[in-house]
């Protein structure tokens, strides 16, 4: 029997940051500031900010990359803070990679082949989304 989901829902947005050419795409993964597990830049959608704006902001703060946010490519959920976080994931094209960024001391960034990114992330629901995107027509446009 499945465990019931906690009642509180946190709305988050994340960025699937990509670089490279079709057939050789890489995705940016970052380490969690707590557990060190790999994932994508993501954060709470604050009042007055859009999901797309949050994805861009978190990419800059957590990973030190400026991006051009595109279409939504999927979503995933995970448990945190006594509730459920629902993350809307947006394709994001790399514009510029910075040497210094706000959370540089807390996180490591790593570029991995898109085709194998699902095997590197720590959150099973994100791994499922990445695997689905890798075997479908790709991560959106």
Image: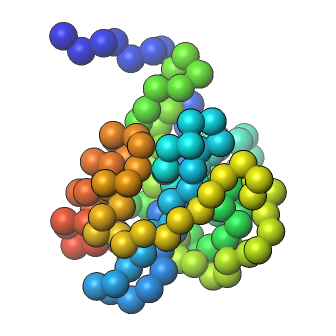
Query: x%, y% of residue 107?
Result: 66, 52
Query: x%, y% of residue 10?
Result: 56, 31
Query: x%, y% of residue 46?
Result: 71, 42
Query: x%, y% of residue 134?
Result: 26, 66
Asked if residue 23 can be seen in this view, the reply is yes
Q: What is the image's colouring? A: rainbow
The residue shown at (31%, 54%) is 119
Q: Quadrant of the N terminus?
A: top left
The residue shown at (52%, 20%) is 83
The residue shown at (79%, 63%) is 101
Which of 11/104 is in front? 104
Looking at the rendered structure, the number of numbered marks drawn on it comes to 0
Q: Quadrant of residue 68?
A: bottom right
Q: Quadrant of the C terminus?
A: bottom left
The residue shown at (56%, 36%) is 35
Which of 26/77 is in front? 26
For residue 34, above or below residue 121: above
Furthest toward the bottom, the residue is 21
For residue 98, above or below residue 10: below
Asked if residue 52 can be seen in this view, the reply is no
Q: Quadrant of residue 54?
A: bottom right
Position of residue 1 in the picture relative to residue 90 (left or right): left
Which of 7/34 is in front? 34
Position of residue 122 in the picture relative to residue 63 (left or right): left
Which of 80/38 is in front? 38
For residue 82, above or below residue 9: above
For residue 123, above or below residue 40: above
């Amino acid at each position: 029997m499945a465990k019931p989901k906690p009642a509180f829902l946190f709305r988050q947005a994340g960025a699937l940051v990509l670089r490279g050419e079709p057939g050789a795409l890489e995705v940016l993964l970052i380490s969690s500031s707590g557990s060190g597990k790999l994932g994508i830049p993501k954060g709470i959608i604050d009042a007055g900010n859009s999901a797309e704006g949050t994805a861009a902001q978190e990419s800059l703060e957590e990973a030190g990359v400026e991006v051009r946010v595109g279409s939504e490519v999927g979503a995933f959920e995970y448990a945190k803070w006594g509730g459920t976080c629902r993350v809307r994931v947006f394709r994001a094209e790399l514009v510029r990679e910075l040497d210094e960024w706000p959370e540089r001391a807390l996180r490591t960034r790593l570029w991995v082949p898109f085709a194998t990114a699902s095997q590197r992330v720590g959150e099973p629901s994100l791994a499922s989304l990445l695997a689905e995107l890798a075997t479908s027509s790709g991560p959106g446009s």
